[in-house]
Amino acid sequence: MRNPAPRSAFLAIAPACDGRRTSIINAARTLRRLAGLVLASTALAPEVRAQSERKTLSGSSVAIYNLAGNVSVESGRGSDVVVEVTRRGSDARELRVETSEIGGRQTLRVVYPDDDIIFSGRRDSWGSTEVQVNDDGTWGGKRWRGGRKVRIRSRGRGTEAWADVRILVPEGKSVAAYVAVGELSANNVNGNFTIDCGSGRTTAANVRGSLSVDVGSGGVNVRDSDLDQLTIDTGSGGVSLSRVTALRCVIDTGLGGVQGDNASCDELSVDVGSGGVRFVDSRSSAIRVDAGRGTVSMTLRNSPRSVNIESGSGGVLLGVPGSLSADIDIETGSGGIETDFMLRTNRVERNHVRGVIGDGAGRIRIETGSGSVTLRRN
């Protein structure tokens, strides 16, 4: 049987254990104190709150400029345009809101102090956008002069600030809204509206009067609107029309399709660099479509007065009522030609058909570089 260790050995070991335990206890206490300091500093740190202000712009024509943030155009009362600006972000207090007359119209400009703006309030991660800004806080339009280069990013170093803007418009006013990055919307308004956006989505509903939308990158959706003139220009982004009535619709997209559902444009002009064109249950008297790359499909409820469709690469389907009366000229570089109508033909070739339907009151011309053509009876 082993002899028990001498008492002195236990006495020698005990202090070492007690020291280790003391160190652990002290470390835990230190962590608790640090945690308390962090919580205290967080509680004492100033809360970043949205800062709002309200401005009134008189006159028949106004313009609003904001580099980053969301802009909504809504119906207002009285005789003046009212603009509500809500500044956001950790550096929101550095933004200035200025008003003055520029170029013959009243303007409101959200002025950013830095050339590097961080817009972290956008829901998607979009990278960065650059815009040339004049010294007075304006850009684009007829007053384009160049100015300094401002970069807006979703993350990184810079001034973290943006502004959401609400524009209340009385009936009959002319309003232009310029936004470099952000979403724009117009709802239940009557007047003449210009929307210019560098990067972001634009939606319009229940708009009357005229509407012009210019977007560098982003989709455009217009619905339930009765307009004299509708103009849409996108560099990259699709266009959608739903239950829209207009005397004239002009749509130009570099990259992105165009679709219409129950859209009635007396004059319809569509120019697409790359993307399909599709109109369903629509009405138009004069149609011009130029599609560089993409199919064209149009189903009309009326017999058009004139149709001119060109497709570089992609088939064409045109559906019209059985009462159609038109002079027909269809040509394809590579692809077949089909029709549900009886034609009095004066030229029939594999890739080229000319003829008359009815008394030839209208005129239909369709040409494709590569793709078939179908003329269908609804």
Image (tube, rainbow, N blue to C red):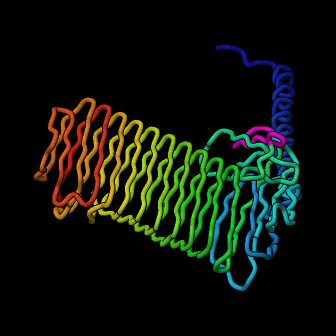
Query: In the displayed structure, would residue 102 be above or below residue 143?
Result: below
**Residue 301, x across and y down, in percent:** 27, 65
**Residue 60, x across and y down, in percent:** 73, 75
User: Residue shown at 18%/64% (left/top)?
Assistant: 323
Classify residue 358 by image quadrant: bottom left
Quarter holding the C terminus? bottom left
Residue 149 located within the stretch drawn in magenta: yes
Classify residue 95 by image quadrant: bottom right
Left or right of 3 in this view: 271: left
Q: Which residues are magenta?
A: 146-157
Extreme-bottom residue of the structure: 78
User: Residue shown at 28%/44% (left/top)?
Assistant: 316
User: Residue shown at 13%/50% (left/top)?
Assistant: 343
Total of numbered circles in the picture?
Answer: 0
Q: Nearer the viewer, residue 15 or 335?
A: 335
**Residue 192, x across and y down, in percent:** 62, 69
Left or right of 336 in this view: 192: right
Extreme-top residue of the structure: 2
Q: Nearer the viewer, residue 74 or 375?
A: 375
User: Residue shown at 85%/33% (left/top)?
Assistant: 23
Quarter holding the N terminus? top right
Residue 336 located within the stretch drawn in magenta: no
Q: Nearer the viewer, residue 76 or 27?
A: 76
**Residue 16, x across and y down, in percent:** 85, 25
